[in-house]
Image: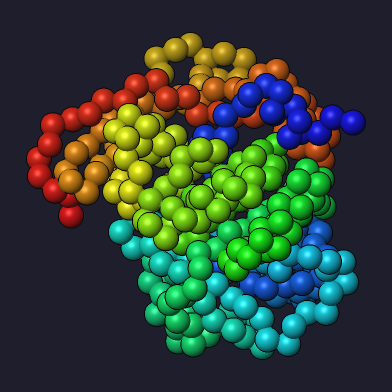
């Protein structure tokens, strides 16, 4: 039986600019089964899950559940749970960790501050500290969301853990099921598609060295999708792999000047990307459709054409001195 990931591979669909969007990730350990909407359909109290979702709305924070790879159909939830917070914006990327016996305490966090990259409330409420261990490799394994995530993600997570990758966790949802196995690397927040164990280890090695591995990269979650496309295009054009060298500073919608089609004119943007050395680029990005139509995930009931971001032009501007 064909799956959404099989169809995507056969079409050689690019995973670029398909990453989920979040300036900050808040991760709570929750073992046991996960439903399609894991925050409200797991062994976590549904009322707490709904409250966390509400607290995070509009703040840039994305809340997800994590668990250690392995058998966990009805695992007992540990009395003390791991919690992580990671901010992904260049120049202020950080990863903090804490342990808590009371996940209700997460509701006391200042979500707006976390979204802005201020970690004071995480340290105060949860006694969290900068994470000094390995970077995190989060593999989506939520088969209730899409079966490809279970069929392809769980074996990858298990392989990583068995080979000694100490930062390996399973996570509830990273979007882009058709690119399974999908991966998020923290603290920089780069997402990957069609991940394999060797490429995950290379991505983690890159984090330790302060660089980005571009193979299979879906984008940095700090940016919206046009910004993800623009940053990856500038990296390719400039040969830049340092993780915090580039920043998306502006995204302007463009007037297409075209007569609307049956579904309206395709959106276009001019994205401004700057370098820490003062260089600057204007990148024109247009939204297209990945044809032919097909289910965008294995659980989708209707056919669709997944949106894609097409880079039309990358223009480098004059240098005016180092950016601040």
- Residue 190 relative to residue 297: left or right: left
| Residue in the picture at 51% in, 21% down | 266
Q: Residue at the top extreme?
A: 259
Asked if 32 appears above or below 218 in the picture, the reply is below
Q: Position of residue 156 (x, y in %)?
A: 71, 52
Residue at the limit of the structure toward the front, as seen here: 163
x, y percent for residue 104: 65, 82
Q: Nearer the viewer, residue 242 or 219?
A: 242
Please state if 229 lies on the left or on the right of 297 as rendered. left
Above-or-below relation of 255 to 131: above
Q: Is residue 297 visible?
A: yes
Q: Would you identify the image quadrant in which residue 35 lies? A: bottom right
* Quadrant including the N terminus: top right
Name the colouring of the figure: rainbow
Residue situated in front as seen by the camera: 9 or 62: 9
- Answer whether residue 24 is visible to the viewer in this image: no
């Amino acid at each position: 039986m064909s799956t959404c990931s099989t169809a995507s591979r056969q079409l050689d669909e690019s995973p670029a600019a398909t990453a989920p969007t979040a300036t900050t990730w808040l991760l709570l350990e929750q073992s046991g089964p996960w439903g399609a909407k894991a925050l409200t359909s797991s062994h976590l109290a549904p009322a707490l899950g709904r409250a966390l979702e509400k607290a995070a709305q509009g703040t840039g924070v994305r809340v997800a559940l994590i668990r250690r790879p392995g058998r966990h159909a009805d695992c007992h939830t540990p009395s003390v749970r791991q919690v992580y917070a990671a901010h992904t914006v260049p120049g202020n990327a950080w990863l903090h960790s804490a342990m808590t016996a009371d996940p209700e305490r997460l509701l006391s966090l200042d979500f707006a501050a976390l979204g802005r990259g201020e970690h004071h409330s995480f340290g105060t409420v949860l006694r969290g500290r900068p994470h000094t261990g390995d970077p995190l490799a989060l593999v989506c394994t939520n088969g209730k969301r899409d079966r490809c995530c279970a069929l392809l993600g769980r074996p990858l997570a298990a392989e990583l853990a068995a080979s000694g990758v100490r930062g390996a966790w399973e996570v509830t949802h990273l979007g882009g099921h058709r690119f399974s196995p999908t991966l998020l690397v923290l603290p920089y927040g780069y997402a990957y598609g069609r991940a394999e164990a060797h490429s995950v280890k290379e991505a983690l090695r890159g984090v330790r060295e302060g660089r980005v591995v571009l193979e299979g990269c879906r984008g940095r979650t700090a940016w919206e999708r046009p910004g993800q496309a623009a940053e990856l295009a500038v990296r390719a054009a400039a040969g830049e792999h340092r993780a915090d060298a580039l920043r998306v500073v502006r995204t302007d919608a463009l007037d297409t000047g075209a007569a609307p089609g049956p579904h309206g004119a395709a959106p276009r943007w001019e994205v401004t990307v700057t370098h820490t050395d003062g260089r600057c680029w204007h990148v024109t990005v247009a939204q297209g459709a990945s044809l032919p139509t097909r289910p965008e995930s294995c659980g989708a009931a209707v056919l669709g054409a997944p949106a894609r971001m097409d880079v039309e032009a990358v223009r480098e501007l004059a240098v005016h001195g180092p950016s601040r």
